[in-house]
Amino acid sequence: MASASKEEVIGKLNVRVLRGNNLIIADPLTHTSDPYVVLQYGAQKVKTSVQKKNPNPVWNEVLQLSVTNPTKPVHLEVFDEDKFTADDSMGVAEINITDIYDAAKLDLSHATNGTRIKTIYPVGVNYLGGESHVQWKDGKVVQDLILKLKKVESGLIVVQLEWVHVPGVKL
């Protein structure tokens, strides 16, 4: 049994940060940006590499987080790397992981590849820039998301979530 001070890990979340689109120009002198993405979940913080001088960066990098509470969102922030001053924020978004968690609890052993489990629509206060589908793909539960960055004029980040079961943990 887990102690009250340490939250039990119920699964892992692989976040494939695919690309950014139409990110803001953070360096007005050079008319460029050097973007990178930071994901934060509780005390965990992971980041992508920096893509130099690119408002439409392609990362295609997988970052892994340990999930302890499926109702807690993943915080995403894009930064512009600066050499001599603090890095500038280029927008924020939140990733709701309850949908992929709920799908991971299902018995999908008889599902065919590509089966859509759930569709989430861009409504209200979510950060979606288009429909998001949770699906069974290559024996895994995955979710593709297009996230609209907030607190900036423009910018989208495309990510794919993959739920990774932890041996011995029953959802």
Image (cartoon, rainbow, N blue to C red):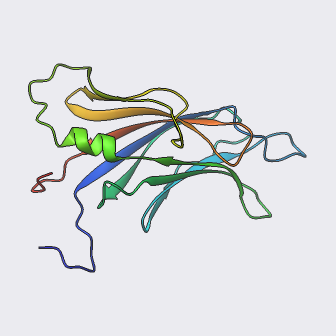
* Quadrant where the image shows the N terminus: bottom left
Dividing the picture into quadrants, the one containing residue 58 is: top right
Q: In this view, does 167 lie above or below 85?
A: above
**In the figure, is residue 61 to the left or right of 88?**
left
Front residue of 70 and 139: 70
Q: In this view, does 143 lie above or below 45?
A: above
Q: Which residue is drawn at 53% across and 39% down?
A: 124
Q: Residue at x 51, y 42 (%)?
A: 126
Image location (x, y in percent) of residue 48 = 53, 49
Give the residue furthest to the right: 29
Q: Which residue is drawn at 29% across and 61% down?
A: 68
Image location (x, y in percent) of residue 16 = 43, 39
Q: In this view, does 6 lie above or below 65?
A: below
**In the figure, is residue 24 to the left or right of 46?**
right
**In the figure, is residue 37 to the left or right of 117?**
right
Front residue of 128 and 138: 128
Image location (x, y in percent) of residue 131 = 46, 26
Dividing the picture into quadrants, the one containing residue 38 is: bottom right
Q: Residue at x 35, y 45 (%)?
A: 14
Dividing the picture into quadrants, the one containing residue 121 is: top left
